Image (tube, rainbow, N blue to C red):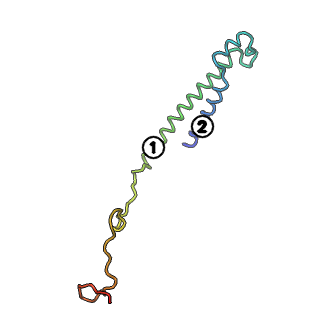
Amino acid sequence: MEIFVLVLHVFAALGIIALVLLQHGKGADVGAAFGGGASGSLFGASGSANFLSRITAVLALVFFLTSLGLTYFSGRKTEHRGVMANPPAQEQPQPSQIPGQSAPPASNPQQPSGSGSMAPEVPK
């Protein structure tokens, strides 16, 4: 449903752009009054302006409603799949992985584990 509303929204936006570019400005009415050629058009002298402005108003309404619909879908999506809805389980870092701390002291590899002596061996 969301894809359909999004496609309708894009088409309404493109339609509004096209219709606004097709419409005459306010200054074009004066030219039509003095034989500008608009009186022989398909919709008459003022019929095209009314027709195009009505279609533009309808497309603007469709654009507004699809904007509200997309906002509704967006709000529903973030409620169920929000960033904090299911936070990922974080692993506890090992002391050697914490930035700013030195690594824990390593055991002396030269000392045999079963020697019983607490004194470190001096290399010869």
Closer-to-camera residue (99/32): 99
Residue type, numbered disc 2: Val
In the image, taking residue 110 as reference, residue 49 lies left or right, namely right
Identify the residue position indicated by label 1 in the image. 76
Per the image, label 2 sits on a secondary structure element best described as: helix
Q: Secondary structure at mark 1?
A: helix
Give the x, y percent position of residue 11: 62, 35
Judge depth for marks 2 and 1 and give the one in front.
2
Which numbered disc flags the more N-terminal residue, 2 or 1? Answer: 2
Residue 1, relative to residue 56: is it above or below? below
Label 2, residues with CA under 10 Å away: few <14, some 14-19, many ≥20: few
Q: Residue at x 74, y 18 (%)?
A: 41
Residue bearing mark 2: 10
Among the 4 quarters of the image, the one containing residue 59? top right
The picture quadrant where one finds residue 91 is bottom left
Quarter-of-image position of residue 123: bottom left
Residue 7 at what x, y percent from top left? Answer: 60, 40
Residue occupying image coordinates x 64% and y 19%: 25
Between residue 14 and residue 96, name the one nearer to us: 96
Point 33% across, 67% down: residue: 102
Marker disc for residue 103: none
Q: Amino acid at mark 1?
A: Arg
Q: Residues within 10 Å of mark 1 (few under 14, many from 20)?
A: few
Q: Quadrant of the C terminus?
A: bottom left
| Residue 100 placement (x, y as % from top left) | 34, 62
Alpha carbon separation for disc pair 2 and 1: 21 Å
Residue 49 image point, x, y percent: 66, 19
Mark 1 and mark 2 in contact (Cβ < 8 Å)? no
Specify whether 121 is left or right of 40.
left
Q: Is residue 114 above or below residue 56?
A: below
